[in-house]
């Protein structure tokens, strides 16, 4: 319905408009949105006007455009992301009292690790992950846990595609990765030093719901920190989140 | 563009579909969505199919439909809600260490208090607010703070509309409310016992950004608790959030 000459549906064009916003680009002009979405200015105008009318976008005094609270509300109310995150948050806070660094919650989304939540101690070390940000599955500790427990077809698709390094220590050899993933399935956690940034170590454990791994709970520690306490805290927290997910059904 | 015979735009119909999901209705059949959205089944099918193709909705094995992670990602990345919530979260955690009940963050959205975040102690008392849920401005402590500092036109529109009670103690007299709102502006906080539920007391303080009140930080305490420590903790936390919002510009 409502297909443009290029064959894109209205929904596709709407997603392209929303997709131009990011944590670095929260406010944009109409011209910027049109250019970044690759849409004609007139089309962009019509879509933005409609989205503003529905509250999914908002205009500020200078006519610049930002994402609307109504979009946030529609996306969160009733989302799986919110249910997972509400179950995980108290236990993530408990992990933070032990490690006092960064604790994160991620899910597998479109072949990447999508971060649903991040808690950071004010004095914590480096960490490039952001809420609603993504990292490659083969690089981040969360991604490795999610990949280890992914559907075998998804796993082989990732392993047979080009594996770009994020840091000098990102594992990019498919056979080495297969062995690492088998080890993660056996151990129930991963310790990944330097695979995202040379200065930090990622630690992650799986969270299961109805027998399937649905998320990864991870910590980012300064490189060289003994990961033992973080592993214990994460594995314990993951089990507690699983119990709360059963309760929240 | 793409208006139906009823004159609704494609965006309006899309919002009506998304709006059928809630925290109590996270998974629905196509028939349920069509009925609740008030759209013909064929139209609903086409919209849902497009939304599934873009990842904004997801289908489970039983062909039932839920909100997609991609919608969550698009809505959060670059949203004002996320910026506010990231600035507020560490300070909300600090409030929780003092009060050990519920701490919440709310904004004024379309004439209601929309809750962006809620932290709850495992042993905390009653609290009906939910993340991405709403409460009337004249009933909740967050709403009262937001209403006290709202644009005078918005305030008068709310005060001149029918004010339904949420509990037996919800203030519904416009003149009494005007005096209460003036007192909130003077004091810098509100203590609202029983205005949402007879068993609890709401306490709230405003958060300012660029001189304007952009959010309310609130606590829900069991009725009868001395609100003094919560007031102090919230006012201190609100000031700290304001400093972090300046930093995050």
Image: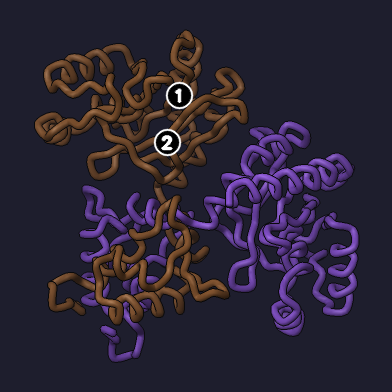
Chain colours: A purple, B brown
Which quarter shows the C terminus of chain B? top left
Residue at 16%, 36% in the rendered image: B154
* Mark 1 or 2, nearer chain start: 2
Compared with A105, A33 (above or below) is below
Residue at 33%, 59% in the rendered image: B19
State how far apart marks 1 and 2 are (Cα).
10 Å
Compared with A103, A3 (above or below) is below
Q: Closer to the camera, B71 or A61?
A: B71
Q: Closer to the camera, B127 or A59?
A: B127
Q: Please report, as a chain letter, where disc 2 is located.
A: B
The number of numbered badges drawn on the structure is 2
User: Element at badge 1?
Assistant: strand
Q: Please state if A200 lies on the left or on the right of A64 as rendered.
A: right
Residue highlighted by disc 2:
B129
Residue highlighted by disc 1:
B220
> Circle 2: is it few (<14), some (14-19), or many (20+) Cα within 10 Å?
some
Compared with B219, A88 (above or below) is below
């Amino acid at each position: 319905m409502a297909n443009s000459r290029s064959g894109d549906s209205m929904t596709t064009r709407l997603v392209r408009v929303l997709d131009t916003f990011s944590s670095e680009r929260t406010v944009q002009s109409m011209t910027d949105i049109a250019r970044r979405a690759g849409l004609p200015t007139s089309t962009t105008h019509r879509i933005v006007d409609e989205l503003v009318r529905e509250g999914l976008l908002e205009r500020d005094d200078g006519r610049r455009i930002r994402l609307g609270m109504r979009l946030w509300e529609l996306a969160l109310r009733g989302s799986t992301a919110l249910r997972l995150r509400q179950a995980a948050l108290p236990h993530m806070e408990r992990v933070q009292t032990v490690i006092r660094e960064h604790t994160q919650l991620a899910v597998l989304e479109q072949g990447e690790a999508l971060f649903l939540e991040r808690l950071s101690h004010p004095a914590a070390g480096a960490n490039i992950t952001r809420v609603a940000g993504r990292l490659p599955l083969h690089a981040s500790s969360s991604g490795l846990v999610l990949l280890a427990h992914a559907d075998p077809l998804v796993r082989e698709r990732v392993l047979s595609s080009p594996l770009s390094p994020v840091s000098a220590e990102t594992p990019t050899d498919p056979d080495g990765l297969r062995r690492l993933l088998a080890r993660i399935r056996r151990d129930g956690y991963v310790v990944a030093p330097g695979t995202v940034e040379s200065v930090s170590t990622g630690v992650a454990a799986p969270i299961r719901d109805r027998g399937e791994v649905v998320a990864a709970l991870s910590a980012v520690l300064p490189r060289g920190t003994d990961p033992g306490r973080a592993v214990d805290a994460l594995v314990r927290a993951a089990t507690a989140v699983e119990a709360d997910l059963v309760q929240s059904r």
